[in-house]
Every structure is written in structure tokens, then in C-alpha cells.
Amino acid sequence: SSDLSSAPHQPQLPAFVTAMAPRRSACGRSLLAACAALAWLCAAPHDGAFASAQLRVQRAQRSGVQMLAAKKKAADAGPPEQPKKPLSSYMLWMVENRPAIVKKLGADATLGTIGKEAGAQWAKLTAAKKKKYETQAAAAKDEYAKKLEAFKAAGGVVVTKSRAKKVKEPKDPNKPKRPPSAYMIFMNENRQKIVKAMPEGYKFTDVAVEAGKQWKALTAAKKKPYEKKQADAKKDYEEAMAKYVKQEA
């Protein structure tokens, strides 16, 4: 403080203390200032300057204590939470339209079939219809960038998720294969007929979508032969697995 430096009775601090001051944190410098003021008070006469200096000591001590309390609170709160990456324009559209796609394909639709149908629908969307989702994605990306900068400024370390490579166990050729579902039996038996009926330039996903529609349109009576084949295949599989497990034991 300029008042302290101009005081007539100010004692000199040891050289090693003043040399350490620039390297101290803001909290440390506040406490050092308090110590300097206390040292001056010990040598100062008890007049008006004494009361003023005493007030400055109290303020310096309070500042140092507040800084220590803030650091402790931040440490107790733990590291800041890393913001999540925003969804792409396609994923925003997918979240909004997935229920309709699932309803269209039916309850038997697999994740792969749903994904292929969604991709096909997204590709057919006009630029005007995509603009809504692209605008939302751009706004979410800007917001994510701001949160990420705040996260880094708070001392956060960005962690990227890396998928651990799964080591595939070698397949046992003697192990019985799982039986196909009733739908897959229908698909295998009718695939060639469905392909022949497809228009020129069809895609693999188009075949799967058409097969799903035909399967959904079948009555319970027409589905029954495929369900019986699946039940018979399942019974054979369970018997074969029982023998396989017994041999491996």
C-alpha cells in the first residue's frame, strides 16, 4: 500500500520475504500485505494512522480468508462436468421421426432396419425441409463451444471417449447355430420374389422395407407356417445345444 510505504515508522521486511512476494498467489500476496501492516503497527505510534492501518490489516486478513474459503469450496465441489457434444442435424431429425418409422416398419423391425429406413428418408428430404434441423444443429454447436471454453477455463480437462477394441473369440464350428425368427424364415423364402418385383435401381434397404411391409400385412393364419418352422428349429437347436454342452463339460 502507498500509505504504508510513506509511513515514517515503517520497518523493513526481511529480503527473503520481499523476494518471494512476486511468486506468491493473489491469496498469498494478501496475507503478506497483512503481515507487513502488522509489522508496521508494532513500530508505529498510537495516533490516527494507527486506526487507519488497523483497518487495512483487517481488510487484508478478510480478503485472504475469503480467497482460501473460495478455493476450498471449489475443491469440495469437484472438477467441472464436461459438456456433451451436440446432436447432428440428422440425429435431431431421427429423434423426432423415429416413432413414425418404427410404426411404419412394425414391431419386428430391427435396429439395423430402422436405421436404414431413416437414412433413406433423410436422403430424400429437400434442402428446405432439412434447413430446420441444420439451424438447430448449428445453434447447439455454438452453445457447446461456449460451454466447452467455460469448462476449460474452470480447469476442466477434455476427455475423449475411445472405444476399446473387443477381442473376438474364435467361433467353434461344432457349436449349433441359433435358429432364425419366423420373419427371417419368411424373408429367406420370399426374398427372390420380392427382388424381382422391385423397380430398377432399387437399394438393399428397399428390399428389407418391402419385406417388412409384406410380413406385417400377413394374417395370423398365413404367418402360422413360418412360426411352426421357427418353433421346430428352436426345438432342434435346444436339443443340439444340450448335447454340445454335455460334450464340452
Image (tube, grey):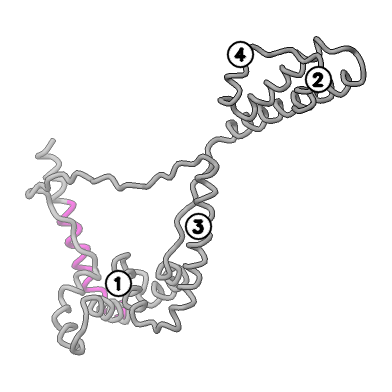
| Amino acid tagged 3 | Tyr
Labels 1 & 3 near each other (Cβ < 8 A): no
Kindly report the distance in space between the C-alpha atoms of the residues bearing marks 4 and 3: 49 Å
Give the mark nearest the N terminus, 2 or 1: 2
Rendering quarter of residue 213: bottom left
- In this figure, which residue is indicated by the disc labeled 3? 144
Residue depicted at x 37% and y 70%:
107
Q: Residue furthest left?
A: 173
Q: Amino acid at mark 4?
A: Ala
Q: Position of residue 119 (x, y in %)?
A: 33, 73
Say if mark 4 contacts mark 3, CB within 8 Å: no
Looking at marks 4 and 1 on the same chain, the residue that comes earlier in the sequence is marked by 4
Q: Amino acid at mark 1?
A: Lys
- The quadrant in which the C terminus is found is top left
Name the amino acid, label 2.
Answer: Ala
* Foreground pick, 73 / 175: 73
Name the mark nearer the viewer: 1 or 3. 3
Tell me which label, 3 or 2, sits earlier in the chain: 2
Name the element at disc 3: helix
Mark 4 or 3: the one toward you = 4
* Residue named by callout 4: 15
Q: Does the segment drawn in magenta span residue 228? A: yes
Q: Nearer the viewer, mark 3 or mark 2?
A: 2
In this orientation, which residue lies closer to the viewer: 234 or 185?
185
Mark 2 highlights which residue? 7
The residues bearing labels 2 and 1 have C-alpha atoms spaced at a distance of 82 Å
